[in-house]
Image: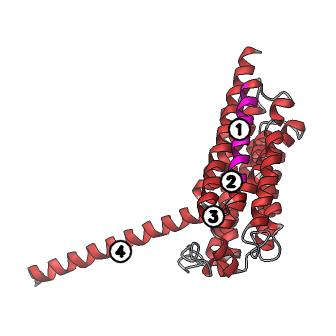
Amino acid sequence: MSIAPSAPQASASVSADTLRVQSAVAVGRQRLADYAELCRPKIAIMTMVAVAVGFTLASPITFDAVKLVIAMLGVVQLVAASSMLNQCLERRTDVLMTRTQDRPIASGRISMPEASAVAAVLTSVGFGLLWNLVNPAAALATLATLLSYTLAYTLLKTKTSLCTTVGAIPGAMPPVIGWLAAGRGLGIEALALFAVFFVWQFPHFLAIGWIHRRDYQSAGLRMLPSFTDKGFLTGLIAVVYAAAFVPISALPAFIGMSGDLYLLSAMAFSVAYLVYSIRFLLHRSEVRARSLLYNSLICLPSLLIALVLDFLRLTAIG
């Protein structure tokens, strides 16, 4: 003879099952959130946009949308992998900084072997997509970007302030990868796109470095040219690169990739970038640094929009 559980016992059993389900759901959500943070979705989105710009500019006659989507999927997997590997390598310094100490690997929520294994899978799948469904040139350029970011830039951050220069190289590669993905070879056009992205990064990252200078210094990361001169050298270098960015931003127009619409836009936004850099040099405050940072985030996307629109206008006319 079986005896049915009493109402209180049944209620307690249901409550325990509900708690276990809720706990599992909460753990799953936290896991997804941690991996999303590891992948740095904002950087991934910006990279995909840059790849799309390079691909579009390299496709004046035929535009293969399927190949572009595959290229972006492949590239974004290697970008996510590089972000994970970066955080694996920087787990000890991340713990020392207020803004990074709660990152998934630094906090211990995700182990370094697990993150490394996931990064290896993403790298293999992304590289395979690019090699087999796009072309080997795009695949190799993307892999080289990952390696230079993780093995050069990341490891140099505790050694020399030149890490910013080294880090600007992988940062300028996405439009070139897009160009290669469209089947075009390296030429003056790809170099012009690289130059625009490369030079733009310096005032942008120097502003970030100044805003977080105390964190960087406490962790031993040499992200600024000097921590002892109240930011004068930081501001001066930002102005030098912003001044160089004025003619460099106009390169696509000078080599025939765009017309007057882009040229006017490039002059307007690059001069504004220079003005904000000069303002930061003259008064090196966190407020001015944030203003420079925000302007940098307006400048580059605006230039890319103007470049693509002007390219499409000229293509339609031609």
Residue type beneath disc 1: Val
Name the mark nearer the viewer: 1 or 4: 1
Q: Image check: 211 left or right of 238?
A: left
Residue type beneath disc 3: Ser
Q: Of the residues under marks 4 and 3, which one precedes in the sequence?
A: 4
In the rendered image of this protein, does residue 209 appear above or below residue 200? below
Name the mark nearer the viewer: 4 or 3: 3
Judge whether residue 121 can be spotted in this image: no
In the rendered image of this protein, does residue 75 appear above or below residue 111? above
Q: Of the residues under marks 1 and 2, which one precedes in the sequence?
A: 1
**Count of residue discs:** 4
Q: Of the residues under marks 3 and 1, which one precedes in the sequence?
A: 1
Label 4, secondary structure: give it. helix
Label 2, secondary structure: give it. helix
- Extreme-right residue of the structure: 187
**Residue 76 image offset from top left, x and y in percent:** 66, 52
**Distance (Cα) linking label 4 and label 2:** 51 Å
Q: Quick one: 210 or 139, which is closer to the camera?
A: 210
**Badge 3 density bin: few <14, some 14–19, many ≥20, Cα 10 Å:** some
**Residue at 68% over, 80% down:** 219
